[in-house]
Image (spheres, coloured by chain):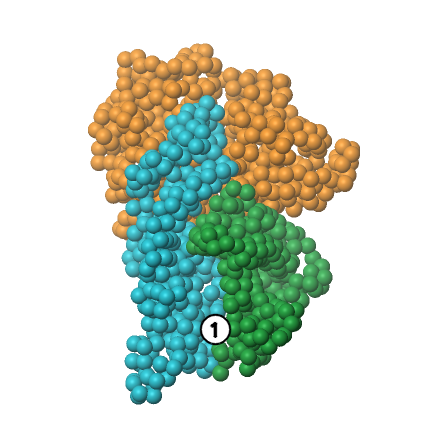
Chain colours: A orange, B cyan, C green
């Protein structure tokens, strides 16, 4: 059971965690992470890259078939990637692939990618559901959005818009067959309903479980007897972008003061009930080279913040406006109370998803008109350092082009981001990443807040469920323990 | 009969006017459906392409004419979200909403009318006071609060009822109860008022004087006349029922039309919002018309007024 | 309505509902005025290390998801609730009554047209209308109140029109005129109380509806913006913890129920006192 309905059955045309959870039962990618975070073969059996890092060759697994009976051979895989890269087809999830991959061709029994520039995170990119291989027939007929056809262990059966997605076991699966007859995906936007469903057995697996309920499953009582809750370290960074064009946020001292006034430890304690980590840097802990919070860095330093505001001539504080989507509103409300202590009055505009996207991605003149100073949101790109930096900080990514929502522009940072993306050598890369993070700590174009754990609940009797770094739930290896009845998540 | 006929004839005209207002209102909503469907990380040119594909880049008047032309042929367009025809979506979900609403009214009527009669007959005595207190409380509670507390108590703690969704008869208990709260109170009060009014009439006194059994006087002579305002209220309250259905279906995850509406507003799924809103208006208009007709049949005096 | 020998309405007193409703409402008014002065606390003061504490002596209604004292917020929120009622009723009655009076005196075709529009608006599902209005204006307490006012306007249009028409044609009116009672005297002694009390009943009963409607809108995320201690928003936020903590949802719900019951009692009470025939 999930918190939102799937957006599409087309893996390339979505960017939502909940959708990816559903789609991961139907589709497979060339390579995949195992539970230890290592890249393992999936539809590709092995691979190699050229010395300059621009050409990647993958051998395709033989005897794999799509659910519609077509063979998943190198032709089909090439066709699937050509579709992903075809600029004439609007695909919501194709953005990264299109900026990284120049072309794709087949060469005998293998597929060869040519990149636009060396890209250290290319293999992690190929684990993303967006790059999953789809049936060429379904893609051509344009039915993918409603009817999934992949190679995965479960076969798409029906999508009752607003109700559920039904699947059944793929009898012809190339790997170890799924252990359940089928999976049923349901969703509710009410966090408390997810918790109740787990307790009543209306759902066997729920993700994400609101941290409020996690401790129920650790105490003595009904909840702990019927289900257990697991926390998996997440890679979703919650942050607040500051509008660099709006006074007084154009002053780095003011931005640093805002950061100093934040008690990130309290945010984690109160909002996440401890299930997460405070974030003081731009990169999430899954990246090698990410800086952890320094001593006392995660706590507020109100006197330092006030002093900084005073040097900026703002000892009486000021007012700013924040825009936030409904589910992330508590974050804004907590920050509002923290900033109030240094005299900064934050007006919160809680917006529906669509309205929020418009205000958050608005160009400078619109943001100036609407007086939008702070934009609260989250971003997740596990293991992809470049994807955690470039869209948010590079000057070319300024909204509305991409997610540089506060219009931060720093040429030296742009150069550093390019250097990090191109460097294959680990030590050199980590040094660059460190340089980037320190620069961002001085400039504070964005306030990192915390990284939340993925919490998921599993009923007793179901085993083998795990969560991906992105917060999606992986139920492919799930099985019933003992002789319990077979159930669906 | 003439005013009824005139109103029936005016209905298409009213629907036309309302459809324009609703169309205008929906398109004036902030939020761009193409952007919403694509998600934030998608470049503008892709979104522009989608906008074109969905016909959202046309001028407003062209979009409205297009809608009207198709609507007259019974085609309300397709959902922007997944391309399903709006009519199919509604047909798929309407039965759920209708059974829920129908059952709620059934419960409300079977509680409200006998309750109202009892309250009227025992006016001022304890059954009257108790019933009035119950309706007062019932009408004063927020539907979603009752729903949430009900879920917590009956589904999570006691395990008597399923939590949410539709399926067995047990799934109906909580949502029907929540939906029936307000109309029950309303019907009971209207019946009580109507009955007390009627029971004071001379012909009822005559009937008692003639020695007719009191159950017969109540049901055969008094009730039909007392029901006229009840019918009107039930019809007028349909809008209120739709409103509480929006909340109830959302809480219970009921696969009905009202929840579809909430989702569609969130995603700015114009054709679906348009279709459902017009359906709701049509339903309410027809219901008032039916109520007036029933009133006419119940009470011949109406004809003269 | 109790009438004297000329059939003119007069008042009667009695009725427990009236006293019950009256005392609940006066208690709430008193709390709204004095409560914040007595408590003298900050309703938006957070303590993220002590969230969702169960009710205790220090926090009679527990704390919410931000560690804020729910009781303090309820008391401060009372003013907001009363403000909500006032604003939306003033807007609704302020538009509805003039339109209704105008309609009653307007030429027949215009009267018909106005009443048709008003009837359609009345029949239109209120929450859907509010949903559209608030989506258009953007979420916020004032916008939500405007939306609520919008769907209560027709009630006042009809009420005002009916009253004017009825008074015009009332036999007691003719009787008084025939008896030679002066126009001013008729207006002050008979028409005015008649109109004001009907209006009062309607306003009291609508107040309850306003509170419930505002709560429903807040439930759908379209109501007050944080950190306002608005009851509907508190209840709606509280539901996210339901299952782990019942108090953030229960107490605002009880506060709303108490207020609405109080208002409905008062409305019923006033009506009963006017409507002599309803009394034994």
Which residue matches tag 1? B133
Q: Viewer-proximal residue, C56 or A480?
A: C56
**Position of C107 compared to B71: left or right?**
right
Residue placed at 39% from the left, 76% from the top?
Answer: B198
Badge 1: chain ID: B
Residue placed at 60% from the left, 24% from the top?
Answer: A436
| x and y, in percent, of residue A145 in the image | 33, 32
- Above or below, A378 against C171 in this view is above
Tell me if mark 1 has few (under 14), some (14-19) or many (20+) residues whose alpha carbon lies within 10 angstroms of its own: some
Quadrant containing the C terminus of chain B is bottom left
Res. B212 image quadrant: bottom left
Quadrant containing the N terminus of chain B is bottom left
**Position of A447 compared to A114: left or right?**
right
Residue A173 in sight here:
yes
**Position of B112 compared to A330: left or right?**
left
Q: Viewer-proximal residue, A353 or C4?
A: C4
Residue placed at 28% from the left, 40% from the top?
Answer: A158
- Above or below, A17 against B153 in this view is above
Res. A37 image quadrant: top left
Q: How many marks?
A: 1
* Dot 1: element: helix
| x and y, in percent, of residue A410 in the image | 63, 21
Residue placed at 69% from the left, 45% from the top?
Answer: A340
Residue A425 in sight here:
no
Q: Viewer-proximal residue, B215 or B285?
A: B285
Q: Viewer-proximal residue, C156 or A1?
A: C156
| x and y, in percent, of residue B260 in the image | 38, 46
- Above or below, A381 against A301 in this view is above
| x and y, in percent, of residue B173 in the image | 35, 61
- Above or below, A89 against C157 in this view is above
């Amino acid at each position: 059971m999930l918190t939102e309905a799937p957006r599409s059955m087309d893996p390339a045309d979505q960017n939502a965690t909940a959708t990816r959870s559903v789609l991961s039962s139907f589709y497979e990618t060339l390579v995949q992470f195992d539970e230890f975070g290592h890249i393992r073969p999936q539809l590709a059996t092995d691979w190699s890259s050229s010395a300059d890092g621009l050409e990647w060759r993958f051998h395709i697994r033989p005897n794999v078939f799509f659910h519609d009976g077509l063979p998943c051979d190198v032709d089909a895989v090439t066709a699937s990637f050509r579709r992903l890269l075809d600029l004439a087809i609007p695909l919501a999830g194709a953005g990264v692939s299109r900026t990284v991959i120049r072309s794709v061709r087949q060469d005998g029994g293998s597929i060869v990618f040519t990149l636009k520039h060396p890209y250290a995170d290319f293999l992690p990119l190929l684990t993303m559901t967006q790059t999953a291989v789809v049936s060429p027939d379904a893609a051509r007929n344009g039915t993918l959005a409603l009817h999934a056809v992949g190679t995965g262990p479960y076969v798409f059966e029906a999508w009752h818009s607003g109700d559920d997605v039904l699947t059944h076991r793929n009898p012809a699966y190339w790997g170890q067959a799924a252990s359940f007859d089928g999976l049923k995906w349901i969703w509710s936007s009410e966090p408390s309903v997810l918790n109740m469903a787990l307790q009543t057995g209306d759902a066997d697996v729920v993700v994400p479980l609101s941290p409020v309920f996690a401790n129920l499953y650790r105490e003595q009582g009904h909840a702990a007897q019927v289900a257990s809750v697991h926390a998996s370290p997440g890679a979703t960074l919650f942050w607040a972008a500051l509008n660099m064009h709006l006074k007084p946020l154009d002053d780095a001292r003011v931005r640093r003061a805002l950061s100093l006034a934040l008690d990130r430890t309290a945010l984690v304690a109160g909002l996440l009930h401890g299930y997460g980590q405070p974030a003081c840097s731009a990169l999430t802990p899954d990246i090698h080279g990410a800086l952890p919070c320094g001593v006392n860095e995660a706590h507020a330093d109100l006197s330092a913040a006030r002093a900084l505001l005073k040097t900026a001539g703002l000892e009486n504080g000021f007012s700013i406006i924040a825009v936030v989507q409904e589910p992330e509103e508590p974050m804004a409300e907590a920050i509002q109370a923290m900033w109030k202590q240094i005299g900064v009055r934050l007006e919160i505009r809680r917006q529906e998803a669509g309205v929020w996207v418009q205000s958050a991605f608005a160009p400078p003149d619109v943001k100036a008109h609407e007086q939008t100073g702070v934009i609260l949101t989250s971003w997740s790109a596990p293991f992809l350092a470049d994807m955690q930096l470039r869209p948010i900080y590079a000057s070319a990514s300024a909204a509305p082009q991409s997610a540089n929502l506060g219009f931060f522009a720093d040429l030296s940072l742009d150069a550093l981001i390019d250097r990090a993306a191109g460097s294959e050598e680990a030590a050199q890369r980590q040094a660059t990443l460190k340089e980037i993070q320190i620069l961002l700590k001085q400039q504070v174009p964005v306030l990192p807040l915390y990284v939340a754990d993925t919490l998921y609940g599993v009923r007793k009797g179901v085993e083998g469920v795990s969560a991906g770094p992105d917060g999606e739930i992986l139920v492919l290896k799930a099985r019933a323990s003992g002789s319990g009845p077979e159930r669906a998540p | 009969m003439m005013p009824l006929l005139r109103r029936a004839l005016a209905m298409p005209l009213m629907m036309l006017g309302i459809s324009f207002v609703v169309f205008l209102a929906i398109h004036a909503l902030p939020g761009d459906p193409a952007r919403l469907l694509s998600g934030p990380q998608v470049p503008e040119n892709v979104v522009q392409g989608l906008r074109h594909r969905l016909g959202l880049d046309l001028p407003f008047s062209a979009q409205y004419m297009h809608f009207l032309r198709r609507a007259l042929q019974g085609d309300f367009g397709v959902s922007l979200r997944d391309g399903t025809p709006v009519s199919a979506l509604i047909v798929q979900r309407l039965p759920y909403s209708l059974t829920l609403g129908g059952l709620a009214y059934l419960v409300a009527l079977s509680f409200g009318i006998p309750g109202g009669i009892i309250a009227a007959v025992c006016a001022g005595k304890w059954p009257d006071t108790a019933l009035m207190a119950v309706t007062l409380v019932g009408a004063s509670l927020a539907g979603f609060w009752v729903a949430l507390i009900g879920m917590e108590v009956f589904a999570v703690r006691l395990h008597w009822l399923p939590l949410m969704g539709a399926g067995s008869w047990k799934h109906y208990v909580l949502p029907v109860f929540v939906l029936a709260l307000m109309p029950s109170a309303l019907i009971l009060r209207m019946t009580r008022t109507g009955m007390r009014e009627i029971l004071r009439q001379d012909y009822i006194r005559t009937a008692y004087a003639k020695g007719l059994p009191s159950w017969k006087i109540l049901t055969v002579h008094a009730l039909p006349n007392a029901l006229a305002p009840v019918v009107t209220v039930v019809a007028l309250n349909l809008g209120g029922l739709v409103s509480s259905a929006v909340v109830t279906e959302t809480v219970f995850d009921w696969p009905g039309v009202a929840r579809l509406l909430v989702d569609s507003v969130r995603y700015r799924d114009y054709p679906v919002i348009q279709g459902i809103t017009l359906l709701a208006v049509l339903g309410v208009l027809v219901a008032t018309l039916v109520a007036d007709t029933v009133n006419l049949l119940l009470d011949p005096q109406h004809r003269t007024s | 309505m109790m009438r004297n020998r000329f059939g003119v309405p007069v008042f009667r007193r009695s009725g427990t509902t009236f006293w019950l409703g009256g005392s609940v409402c006066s208690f709430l008014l008193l709390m709204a005025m004095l409560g914040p002065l007595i408590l003298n606390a900050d309703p938006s003061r957070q303590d993220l290390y002590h969230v969702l504490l169960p009710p205790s002596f220090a926090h009679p209604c527990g704390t919410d998801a931000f560690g804020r004292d729910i009781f303090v917020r309820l008391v401060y929120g009372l003013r907001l609730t009363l403000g909500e009622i006032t604003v939306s009723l003033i807007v609704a009655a302020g538009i509805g009554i003039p339109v209704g009076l105008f309609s009653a005196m307007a030429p027949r075709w215009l009267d018909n047209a106005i009443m048709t529009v008003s009837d359609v608006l009345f029949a239109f599902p209120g929450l859907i209308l509010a949903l559209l209005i608030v989506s258009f204006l953007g979420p916020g307490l004032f916008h939500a109140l405007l939306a609520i006012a919008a769907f209560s306007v027709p009630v006042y249009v009809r009420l005002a029109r009916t009253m004017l028409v009825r008074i015009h044609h009332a036999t007691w009116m003719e009787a008084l005129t025939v008896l030679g009672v002066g126009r001013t005297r008729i207006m002050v002694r008979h028409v005015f109380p008649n109109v004001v009390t009907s209006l009062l009943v309607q306003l009291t009963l609508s107040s309850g509806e306003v509170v419930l409607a505002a709560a429903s809108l807040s439930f759908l995320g379209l109501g007050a913006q944080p950190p306002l201690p608005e009851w509907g928003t508190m209840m709606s936020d509280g539901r996210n913890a339901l299952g782990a903590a019942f108090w953030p949802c229960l107490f605002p719900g009880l506060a709303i129920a108490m207020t609405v019951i109080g208002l409905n009692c008062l409305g019923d009470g006033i009506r009963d006192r006017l409507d002599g025939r309803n009394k034994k």
